[in-house]
Image: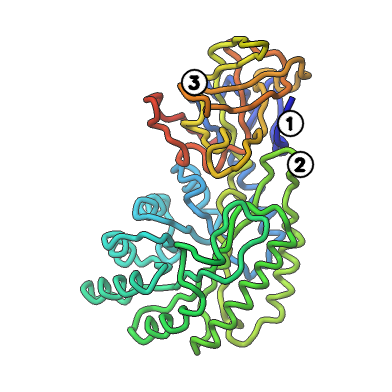
Amino acid sequence: MKPFGPIPSGFDSIDGQLSIGGMTAEALVDQAGDTPLFVYSKELIGSRMADLRRAMPERLSIHYAIKANPYSDILQLMSGLVDGFDIASAGELDLALAAGQSPERISFAGPGKRDRELRAALLAGVTINCESENEAHRALAIGHVENIAPKLAIRVNPDFELRGSGMKMGGGAKPFGLDAHRVPQLAREVIASGAVWQGLHIFTGSQALDADAIIETQGNVLALAAQLTDDIGVPLPHLNMGGGFGIPYFHSDKSLDISRIGAALQGRFNTLPDGLLSTKFAIELGRYLVGETGVYLTRIVDRKESHGVTYLITDGGLHHQLAASGNFGTVVRRNYPVAIATHFVAEPTEVVNIVGCLCTPLDRLADQVSMPHADIGDLVAVFCAGAYGATASPEAFLGHGPAREILI
């Protein structure tokens, strides 16, 4: 038997079934029309945002990283809850604008921006986080042709990383951003060109659960920003400090202590150097805001045994939940939080493997987990499905099509 991750708080039961927003899992499937189905909770998203606001310094803006979950209903909800959107493509720019986000509150990062994407961002009036000298020069050239002063910031590749992060986004050779020692020269060039200087973007890593590591990294980010500001020679207008706040997916993972992070950051804000006194600060979060607020519901379509092992075969799988299958950056596959949604409060009676419907042994949703007895027709719930689910998975693989999505 293998453990599975902790089921997030905020989920209830009605008549023994998993309930979300006062509706049972079966009622939610009926409303949506079929399985597989992603269900996202407005209440849980609002609660997560409120907790974060209380913990973080009032001076700190909170941005939503659209890549975590670009579902249109979530974007419309988040547009009224956060201070800005961070995007990584022209497609996400269209989604952000359609959700009602003001262009002044949108920033565009990503190492491979095409000229047409730079032009679209420039014409819309969003901030472009330049990832190289070449990209900055292309943006300036497009601005000259369009007779518009582009809003430019520089993404910095720092010499440090976020300890314990799931994905390293800074430190050493990286395709992201400009090596720190080259930033001042480009910044002075951008300022001299007449572009609107928007500051720095320093993103070091993601999915960290160690508050001390995040506190240390935020201190390093502020120190680097102060040093670069001195070298550039003008006060820094804006600093995007990145994110990195993780959520517990696996057995033994613990929730992040955001109160400690917020208190430490407030202490640093109280002693800022002159070049950062008027700076506007932001963090960008995606997974932390929506990851634990979503559930993936998939129906059992077969139950079988093979060499003494029981398999529950569902109509879902890695084509919707690549991360839960263990094929999205993890080295050793571990079980996400999972439950039999139609027997949510029942005691476990058997050990089973829960798999998807695809013709590949990679399509695994849970290995050797202890569950209540489940039959054909029962619903399986995979938790922590609010981020990097539907759009981070190969939905076209084998032609099963996309999952449904609802926000309740």
Residue 217, picture quadrant? bottom right
Could you say whether the residue bearing mark 3 is in a helix, strand or loop?
loop
Q: Nearer the viewer, residue 105 or 93?
A: 93
Q: Residue at x 45, y 62 (%)?
A: 175
Do tag 2 and tag 1 residues touch (Cβ < 8 Å)?
A: yes
**Residue to which mark 2 is pinned:** 252
Image position, residue 95 (x, y; %): 39, 50
Query: Which quarter of the image is occupied by the N terminus?
Result: top right
Residue type highlighted by circle 3: Cys
Mark 1 or mark 2, which is nearer the start of the sequence? 1
Position above or below: 72 against 345:
below
Element under disc 2: loop
Q: Residue at x 39, y 25 (%)?
A: 398
Q: Residue 3, labelled with which disc?
A: 1
Return the x and y of residue 247 as percentages of the image width and height.
Answer: 66, 47
Residue at mark 3 to residue at mark 1: CA–CA distance: 23 Å
